[in-house]
Amino acid sequence: MYEIELKLNVPFNLDITLDCGQTFRWEKNNGYWKGIVRNTVLFVTQNGNTLKVRSSSKTLLGRNLINGIKHYFSLDHDLVTITNHLSGKLKFFNEYSRSVSLDAFKESSGLRILRQDPFEMVIQYMISTRNSIPNIKRISDNLSAFFPENRLMINDETFYTFPTLKQLKGLSINDLRSLKLAFRSTWLHELTEKIESEDFFIKLKELSLKEKLDTLMQYKGIGFKVASCVALFGYGELNAFPVDIWVKRIMEKLYNITGSTKKIMEFGMQSFSPYAGYYQEMLFRYIRTRKGIINICK
DNA sequence: GCCCAGGGGTAGT
DNA sequence: ACTACCCATGGG
C-alpha cells in the first residue's frame, strides 16, 4: 500500500463529489471511501483541507499518485469561475429559477466532475437505462466479479476491476441476461461486437462534443442522455447536459420547458454554456437530496 | 397488485 | 419532429 497526504488549496468536497450520482463504484465505510479507478484500489478520506489517500498502486492514470489523484478528482477545474459564470447566465431568468439554482450551487459546494474511464461510462450508463441507482451499482459489480482474473485482494478485502472491452466481447447475450442486464443485454452485446478495439474510445477524444454525441448515438442503447453522460463524466466535456427524469422534472419547474429530452438538453447547453454539465450535476443532486419534492416556495 | 427507477427503440402520425 | 407504447427486473 502506498499512502499520501494532499493539502488542498482549492475548494473540494469528497463526500459530495462521490455521492452525487456521477459514479457507481465508490462506497463509504467507517469514514473511508473505497473505490476502483482503472486497475487501482483507492481508500480516500477528507479532513478539512487534507486529503488522505491509500492506494494499491504507486501510479494512477499514468501519473505519480499525487498527480493522478489531482487529475481524477479534477482539482484543476476552477470552481469559482464555473459558478460565477453560471450565476451570470442565471440573470437572464426569473427570480425563482435564480434563487433555487443558487441554493443548488451552495449545497453542491466542492462538487467536482470526475475524470472517469469512457468505456466504463458507456457500459454503466447503458445499464442505467430505466433502472435504479442501487440496481445499477449491483449489476456493475456483478459484471466485474464475473471475471475472476479481475480480482484484487487488498487487506483481506476483495475488489474487482471493471471489465475491458475484450473481456465483455467474450460474453453471450445469455451471460448478460444472467447478470440481470435484462433488455439491455442485446444492446451491450451488439456494442461490444461492433467496436473493434479500445482505440475507438481514444479517437473519440479528438472529436467535438457534438461529434462525440453523434458517434456514440449510432449504437443501440445510447441516446442523448447516455451519450451526454459519457461525454461529461468520461471525456470532461463540461458543456454536456444529460437529461434524465429528475433533471427533466426540475427544468420543467424552473424554466417551464416541457417535451423531449433532446429539447431540454439543447436548452441547457445553450443557456449555460460552457459549463452546462456542472449546472446539470448540481441540479441533479439538489433534487435528489430532496427526494424529488420540488414545490420549493410559492 | 400497483408504481417507479440517472431511457431508448420502434411504429405510427 | 412529436407521441404512445413497450421493454425486464428489483424495491417500495
Image: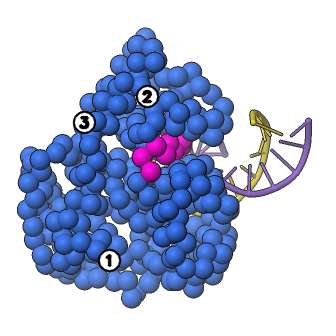
Chain colours: A blue, B purple, C yellow
What residue range appears in magenta? A237-246
Write the residue at 28% across / 74% down.
A62
* Disc 1 to disc 2, C-alpha distance: 39 Å
Residue indicated by mark 3: A80
Check disc 1 and give the amino acid type.
Answer: Asn
Within the image, what quadrant is residue A174 found in?
bottom right
Q: Which residue is mark 1?
A: A39
- Amino acid carrying label 2: it is Ile
- Kindly report the distance in space between the C-alpha atoms of the residues bearing marks 1 and 3: 32 Å
Toward the viewer: A136 or A61? A61
Q: Position of residue A144 (x, y in %)?
A: 43, 75
Are the residues under marks 3 and 2 on the same chain?
A: yes
The stretch drawn in magenta includes residue A241? yes
Q: Which mark is residue A23?
A: none
User: To which residue does mark 2 refer?
Assistant: A293
Q: Are marks 1 and 2 in contact (CB under 8 Å)?
A: no
